[in-house]
Every structure is written in C-alpha cells, then in structure tokens.
Amino acid sequence: SQQGEEDPQALSIQEGENATMNCSYKTSINNLQWYRQNSGRGLVHLILIRSNEREKHSGRLRVTLDTSKKSSSLLITASRAADTASYFCAAWGGKSTFGDGTTLTVKP
Amino acid sequence: DAGVIQSPRHEVTEMGQEVTLRCKPISGHDYLFWYRQTMMRGLELLIYFNNNVPIDDSGMPEDRFSAKMPNASFSTLKIQPSEPRDSAVYFCASSLVITFQTSSDGELFFGEGSRLTVL
C-alpha cells in the first residue's frame, strides 16, 4: 500500500481561492515532501518539511505536519490558473513512497 | 544545467520486443532513481543507484526488467520481452543526497519521462 495518501483525489476551485490538500502516511518518517506535476511532465519539488517541524512556508505555499496523526496538509493561497496540476506527497522514511496525488483545477 | 534528460520521450512497440529507456542525471548527483507511473498503481519506485551501484531493486516487477548504470552520467532501464501491462510513463530522477535515513534528505529532480506503449 502507498505510504502517502492524498485527499481529496480531485479539487476544483476558482482563481483567487485557497486550495487545501491533505496527505496521510502509515509509518514513521524522516521528512515529508510535496511535489507538483503538470500534465505530461515530470514531478517538480515544491517543499520539504522535516519530522521535527510543524509548519513551513514558501511563497504562497504553507505546509503543516502532524506526526501524531501521521498527516500533512498543503495550502496554496490565492490560487492561479497556472496552479492547475496534480500534487503529490512523498513520505521519506526507509524508502520514498508517493501517494496517488490530488488533481487541482483552478478556473480563471 | 539541462536537468535530468530522458530518451526516448515516447516509445510504441509490439509485445515481445526489447525496450531500452535512457537517462542522463544531473552532473554531480550521486543518486539515480527509476520510477514507473500508471493510473492504476500511481508512482512506483523500481530501483535506485548510489554512485552507480544498485542499492535497492525490490521494486523491479520481474526478471524481464533490468537496470544498469555504467557510469555517473548514464543509466538504462531495459524491458525484455515487453508486455502490454508494461505500458506506463517511466521517470528517471536524480538527487545529491538521499539516504532515506535523515530528516535532511533533499529533493528529487525528475526528467520529463518516457511514455511507453506496448501493443
């Protein structure tokens, strides 16, 4: 089974709204990473949060990590049409395992 | 740097044929990964190398799959013989340091992928 599981599977919002995606994992991790994949392209690293961190910011991205609940969330604020993509979490612990991703559609 | 370079971008072949996918990692990166992405199974780690040595190939689906890294700037993933269920997008990724053991492990840099269709 996948170490990272994203929720929801698909999310559709209007430009300017915030988008929140969640990730759950099963075992202990060293860090958790979020990646973005545009259609037909490779994955691009967005942000990494270490197991001893609770929150991290990068531009319009905010990531939280709750190791007690084995979950993470990715918040994209003030979304843009260009944010339309699939977003994956990767739990790093023993072996990297990617979830199935959340497909985000931002309507202009 | 040009990033991770994969070839071919698209490959269509018939069942039973040999398929070879190629990857050039980012110069200076010590780790190279091969992933497979399908709708059904998502993104799966097939094998990864450290300093050209295979470290973990437990994700390789079966003996029809083999991977080599003859030098720091080149790796191949070979499927022989290919089957329709091998149809997928195969990604190569490289990284400076990945141990899966520390909280400082950094990012993977992915190529654009090789889309394989086996008829």
Image (cartoon, grey):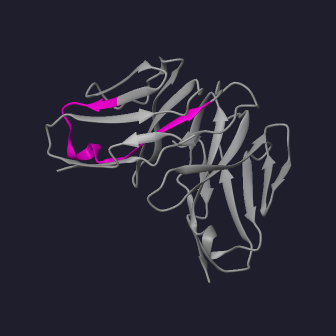
The residue positioned 68% from the left and 58% from the top of the image is A22
The residue positioned 42% from the left and 27% from the top of the image is B74
How far across and how far down the image is residue A59, in percent? 80, 60
The residue positioned 26% from the left and 45% from the top of the image is B85
Which region of the structure is painted magenta? Answer: B77-95
For residue A95, side relative to residue B92 (left or right): right
Q: Is residue A26 visible?
A: no
Residue B14 image-quadrant placement: top left
Q: Is residue B7 visible?
A: yes
The residue positioned 35% from the left and 32% from the top of the image is B61
The quadrant of the image that shows the C terminus of chain A is bottom right
For residue B12, side relative to residue A31 (left or right): left
How far across and how far down the image is residue B54, in percent? 46, 18
For residue B2, side relative to residue B102 (left or right): left
Residue A47 against residue B16 in the figure, above or below: below
Does B45 appear in magenta?
Answer: no
Residue B96 image-quadrant placement: top right
Comparing A44 with A98, the one in front is A44
How far across and how far down the image is residue B26, in percent? 55, 34
How far across and how far down the image is residue B1, in percent? 58, 40
Comparing B21 with B58, the one in front is B21
How many numbered callouts? 0
Does B83 appear in magenta?
Answer: yes
Residue A78 against residue A98 in the figure, above or below: below
Given the current orientation, which residue lies at the most extreme front position?
B1
For residue A103, side relative to residue B107 (left or right): left
Comparing A104 with A7, the one in front is A104
